Image: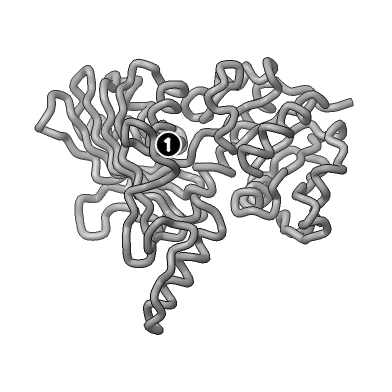
């Protein structure tokens, strides 16, 4: 007997990926429900070789569900996640709303799977920000071996992280430039085609953006509150796939060769670092893959015990949908969730 799973926000980029990954990984389910707002009632979405018709969030009976994968934004999650959890379902939420609640575990299974046991406090497990998820997977084996003191990270984040409208804007602007139409920014603050924008989410009082703050707060909660981290988050004209240039300062010496060996053995990571033309991974190659790719591993001689890394991952997968499914798998495999009667 399998589980009953609902995907809320099934018509969005991440919701569609969730359904695809549930099928790809053969998650042990007996039934799956695609849930969306009333305006999407009856809209068809794919689940493996099958087609599902979307059901109305307002009318759906969540008492029938064991696991609810939420990907409908913070406003919807704020209202609905507690209501769904009260029906007895485990809610795995992809929005930012519950990430900083001390009673809600923030989980990346390769890093802190044990934290998933805390889901019973509120019935919710939070999924981290897409840029944080791939970062902490890369940091975990190095932190265990040599204790990370400080992280300086610059992100190069694809437009899919801002949703379908952002992807449409990149496409429209790119096409428009070739037919001499002036690009008009709507979703972004400036032209995104053939440009980069050092601004993701809202600005905060100290001059950082909320996306940068998220990376700091979430890394501390998931990995180690003692780690110092500073981030600069940049939107780039790439459709799918986030990249990160990571600089580390370690407590103990760790050579590039030792770091490479540790990363090769770590779960969820693929090392591609040939130190030759093309011997590294770019966003184009990571799309559709489950892994966090690491390249350009080298020592930084400007600080004691310094390392540099290049990290790339599919943000719709590891940064969102895949991590949510992996959390569900962790809960199931550890016997932390009983099936509904």
- Residue highlighted by disc 1: 210
Identify the residue at horizontal 37%, vertical 59% (top origin): 190
Q: Is residue 228 above or below residue 268?
A: above
| Residue furthest left as drawn | 302
Identify the residue at horizontal 28%, vertical 43% (top origin): 245
Identify the residue at horizontal 36%, vertical 47% (top origin): 199
Image quadrant containing the N terminus = top right
Percent x, y of residue 234 = 34, 48
Image quadrant containing the C terminus = top right
Counting every numbered tag in the picture gives 1
Q: Quadrant of residue 22?
A: top right
| Residue furthest bottom as drawn | 179
State the scheme by which the image is colored: one colour
Q: Secondary structure at mark 1?
A: helix
Q: Is residue 202 above or below residue 235?
A: above
Percent x, y of residue 150 = 26, 25
Q: Is residue 315 above or below residue 301?
A: below
Q: Is residue 45 above or below residue 268?
A: below
Q: For residue 155, say whether it is visible.
A: yes
Identify the residue at horizontal 80%, vertical 52% (top origin): 38
Circle 1: is it few (<14), some (14-19), or many (20+) Cα within 10 Å?
Answer: some
Q: For residue 266, say whether it is visible.
A: no
Q: Is residue 208 left or right of residue 7?
A: left
């Amino acid at each position: 007997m399998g589980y009953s799973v609902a995907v809320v926000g099934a018509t969005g980029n991440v919701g569609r990926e969730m359904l695809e990954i549930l099928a790809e990984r053969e998650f042990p389910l007996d039934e799956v429900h695609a849930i969306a707002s009333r305006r999407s009632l009856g809209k068809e979405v794919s689940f493996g070789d099958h087609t599902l018709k979307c059901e109305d969030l307002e009318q759906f009976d969540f008492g029938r569900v064991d696991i609810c994968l939420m990907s409908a934004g913070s406003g919807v999650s704020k209202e609905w996640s507690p209501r769904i959890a009260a029906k007895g379902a485990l809610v795995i939420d992809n929005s930012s709303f519950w990430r900083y609640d001390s009673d809600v575990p923030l989980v990346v299974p390769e890093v802190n799977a044990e934290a998933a046991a805390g889901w019973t406090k509120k019935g919710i497990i939070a999924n981290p920000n897409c840029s944080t998820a791939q970062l902490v997977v890369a940091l975990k084996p190095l932190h265990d071996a040599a204790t990370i003191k400080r992280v300086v990270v610059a992100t190069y984040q694809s437009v899919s992280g801002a949703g379908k409208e952002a992807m449409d804007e990149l496409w429209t602007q790119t096409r428009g430039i070739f037919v001499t139409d002036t690009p008009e920014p709507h979703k972004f603050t400036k032209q995104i085609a053939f440009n980069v924008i050092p601004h993701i989410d809202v600005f905060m009082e100290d001059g950082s953006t909320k996306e940068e703050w998220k990376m700091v707060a979430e890394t501390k909660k998931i990995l180690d509150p003692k780690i110092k981290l500073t981030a600069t988050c940049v939107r780039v004209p790439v459709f799918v796939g986030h990249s990160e240039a990571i600089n580390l300062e370690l407590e103990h010496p760790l050579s590039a060769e030792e770091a490479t060996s540790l990363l090769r053995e770590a779960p969820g990571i693929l090392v591609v670092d040939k130190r030759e033309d093309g011997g590294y991974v770019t966003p184009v190659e990571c799309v559709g893959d489950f892994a966090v790719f690491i390249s350009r591993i080298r020592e930084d001689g400007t600080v004691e015990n310094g390392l540099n890394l290049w990290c790339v991952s599919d943000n719709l997968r590891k940064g969102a949908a895949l991590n949510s499914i992996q959390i569900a798998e962790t809960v199931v495999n550890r016997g932390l969730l009983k099936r509904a009667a």
